[in-house]
Amino acid sequence: MKIGKVELLAFIVLVSHWSSSSAWFGDKHKKERKSVLAGEATSSSWVLNRVGSSLLFRVHGNVYPVGFYNVTMNIGHPPRPYFLDIDSGSDLTWLQCDAPCTRCSETPHPLYQPSNDLVPCKDPLCASLQPSEDYECQNPDQCDYEITYADHYSSLGVLVRDVFILNFTNGIQLKVRMALGCGYDQIFPASSYHPLDGVLGLGRGKTSLISQLNGQGLARNVVGHCLSAQGGGYIFFGDVYDSSRLIWTPMTSKDHSKHYSAEAAELIFGGKAMAVASPVTFDSGSSYTYFNSNSYQALISWLKKELNRKPVKEAPDDLTVPVCWHGKRPFKRISDARKYFKPLVLGFTRGGGGEAKFEIPPEAYLIISTKGNACLGILNGSAVGMGDTNLIGDISMLDKVMVFDNEKQLIGWAPANCDRVPKFRGVSI
C-alpha cells in the first residue's frame, strides 16, 4: 500500500503475536464480538466447479499524483464492492472492518461487516501469519494477526472466511469462500490517507488469494499485472499470457514465502555496466523504485555526469521527491524531458547462459511534478531501512506485463499496451 508520496510500502511484512489484552476478541472485545460477528452463518456448501480458468480485474489509479493502483472486489454475503490496493509485496488480503474499528481511516464504502466464520488459531493459514512455528493461541477458536509494514503502517485483526464473487474468463461466475483479514485496528502515518477499503495481497504465501484459488483447483498459481503509464490497467490470476512471449528470470530460492525476488543483477547505465545490484524485489505495493545505497549513489553520479552539459539543472526547491530537475521552461509531460535522459537496464543472469534484461526507460523512472520539473522516481532504499535490497516499484513496471509464476518459480515480463485489456468471450470487467 502506498503511504504518502515517497514513503516505502510494505516491502517487508512482519507479523507478530500480541497479548490477549490488545490483539484478540477476548476480554476487551468479547461483547463487541458477539454483537458484530453474530448472525446467520454464510453457507459453506457452495459447489466449486474446478474451472481451471483465469480471472481478470481492471485496476484504477496511477503512480503520480494518486500514488496507488486499486481494484474493486465484491465480497460478503450479500456481496458488497470494496476498493483494494494491489500489493504483490504482501500476502494477506484484508478489509477495514467494523468489529468495531478502533482506528480506521475514512473508506469509500461502509466498513466491512465480518462473517462469523472464524479461522481457528491452529489452521495452516493462521500459522503462515505467525512469527514462529511454536506460536501460542490466546483463543483457539480464532486467528489473530498483526501486519506491520516498513513505513510503520500496521493492521491488527482477525482472520475470517467469506464469499468472493468471481467472474472467470471462461464465462463462469462462482461464489468462492476464502480467508481474509478483518482489520479492526489500523495505524496510519500522518500523510497516508487514500480512499481505500483495504489491501489485496498478491504475494507468495498461503493466505494470498492466488494460493487459495490454486488450493481449490480454480486457477494455476500464477499472478500478474499490467499497469498503464496513462493510469489504470489490469491484474490477473492464472494463465492469461503466452509464456513464450515473455522474458523470464528465476525467483530466488531465498525468502521463498514472502516476496517476488530475483537474484542479483547488473545495473547498466547508457549501455555500460556501472554497478552490481543485490537481489531485486518486484513490488506493486510501492509507487516508486528503491535502490540500495551503493546502486543509488552510482545512479546519481551517472545522471549528474550525463546532464552536466544539457539544459537541465537540479531543482532543490521542489520537494516532491529528493531529486528533481528543471528545464528552460516547465515540462508538461514526460515526453518533454525524456530526450535528456537515457534508459537504465537491470541484467539478470539466467540459468543456461544469457542475460534477461529488464529495461527501465526514462518514462519508467521519471515523473513530472506539479511545478513542471522532471523528478527521479528512484529513491535511496538504504536511507529508509531497506538495507541492501533493491525494490522495483510501480513506476518501473509501467507498460509492461509482469507475470509471477509460483509453480515454475519464474518472474516474467514483456512490453505491453496496458490500456488494452485482454478480451474473453462472455466476460466484461
Image: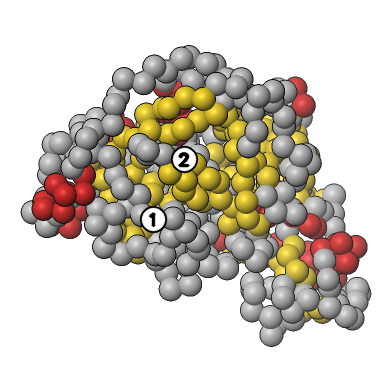
Which quarter of the figure is the C terminus placed in? top right
* Amino acid type at image mark 1: Pro
Q: Residue at x 70, y 54 (%)?
A: 231
* Amino acid type at image mark 2: Asn
Q: Residue at x 64, y 72 (%)?
A: 321
Q: Residue at x 40, y 61 (%)?
A: 153
**SS category of the residue bearing label 1:** loop
The reply, left or right, for residue 165 in relation to residue 397 is left
Q: Quadrant of residue 37?
A: top left
Residue bearing the label numbered 2: 74
The reply, left or right, for residue 382 in relation to residue 45 is right
Q: Residue at x 63, y 55 (%)?
A: 61
Identify the disc placed on residue 142.
none
Q: Position of residue 127 (x, y in %)?
A: 27, 35
| 10 Å crowding of disc 1: few (<14), some (14-19), many (20+) | some
**In the picture shown, does residue 220 fall above or below 13?**
above
**In the picture shown, does residue 85 fall above or below 204?**
below
Colour scheme of the rendered structure: secondary structure
Nearer to the camera, 323 or 169: 169
Q: Position of residue 5 (x, y in %)?
A: 57, 68
Residue 336 appears in view = yes
| Residue furthest left in the image | 27
Residue 348 appears in view = no
Q: Quadrant of residue 423?
A: top right
Nearer to the camera, 194 or 396: 194
- State the separation of the CA atoms marked 1 and 2: 13 Å
| 10 Å crowding of disc 2: few (<14), some (14-19), many (20+) | some
Q: Position of residue 162 (x, y in %)?
A: 34, 35
Residue bearing the label numbered 1: 110
Q: Earlier in the sequence, mark 1 or mark 2?
A: 2
**SS category of the residue bearing label 2:** strand
Q: Position of residue 158 (x, y in %)?
A: 26, 45
